[in-house]
Amino acid sequence: MERRQYPLYIRLALVSAATGVAGWLIRFFGSSFVDPSTNAKLYDLMPAVGSSIMSACSLMFLIVAAATVIDCARTKTFTWTHAIILALAGCVTVAAGIDGAYPR
């Protein structure tokens, strides 16, 4: 039984999405696992760390968008998979821009 090799842009999108989810979890729930009385600096730092990871996710999705466009040009086709990945990359980039413009 052969393993299916997914295109680069799909693999990059999965890694980027996992990074974004990890950043979101750290931003909103990371401070819950740190005792503020014993580790106040880490408690205050966790939302900033999560937000930075989410920003990195946004940059990764820009790379995903570029890889998707390159794949479209290389294969000379535009499929639903390409459309979904590009829409997802656009939404993540806009969300990261809003998150950066209006910090908590």
Image: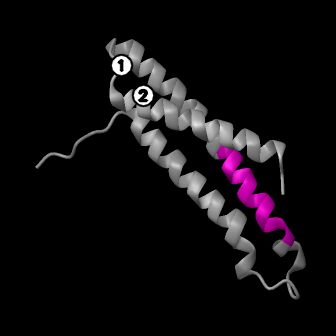
Residue receiving disc 2: 83
The image quadrant where one finds the C terminus is bottom right
Q: Position of residue 49 (x, y in %)?
A: 76, 59
- Horizontally, residue 94 falls left or right of residue 5, namely right
Badge count: 2
Are circles 2 and 1 on residues that touch, CB within 8 Å? yes
Magenta stretch containing residue 14, yes or no? Answer: no
Q: Which residues are the magenta region? A: 44-56
Disc 2 marks a residue whose amino acid type is Ala
Magenta stretch containing residue 54, yes or no? Answer: yes
Q: CA distance from mark 2 to mark 1?
A: 7 Å
Q: Residue at x 70, y 72 (%)?
A: 30
Q: Secondary structure at mark 1?
A: loop
Residue receiving disc 1: 78
Q: Residue at x 70, y 81 (%)?
A: 33
Q: In the image as oriented, which residue stretches furthest toward the left?
A: 1
Q: Residue at x 40, y 28 (%)?
A: 82
Disc 1 marks a residue whose amino acid type is Phe
Q: Position of residue 12 (x, y in %)?
A: 47, 40
Crowding around mark 1 (Cα neighbors within 10 Å: few <14, some 14 to 19, many 20+) is few
**Residue 90 vertical position relative to residue 54 in the rendered view, above or below:** above
Q: Residue at x 82, y 75 (%)?
A: 43
Q: State the residue in front, 90 or 21.
A: 90
- Horizontally, residue 60 falls left or right of residue 43, namely left
**Residue 28 vertical position relative to residue 75 in the rendered view, above or below:** below
Q: Position of residue 47 (x, y in %)?
A: 78, 63
Crowding around mark 2 (Cα neighbors within 10 Å: few <14, some 14 to 19, many 20+) is few
Q: Secondary structure at mark 2?
A: helix
- Horizontally, residue 33 falls left or right of residue 15, namely right
SS majority, magenta? helix
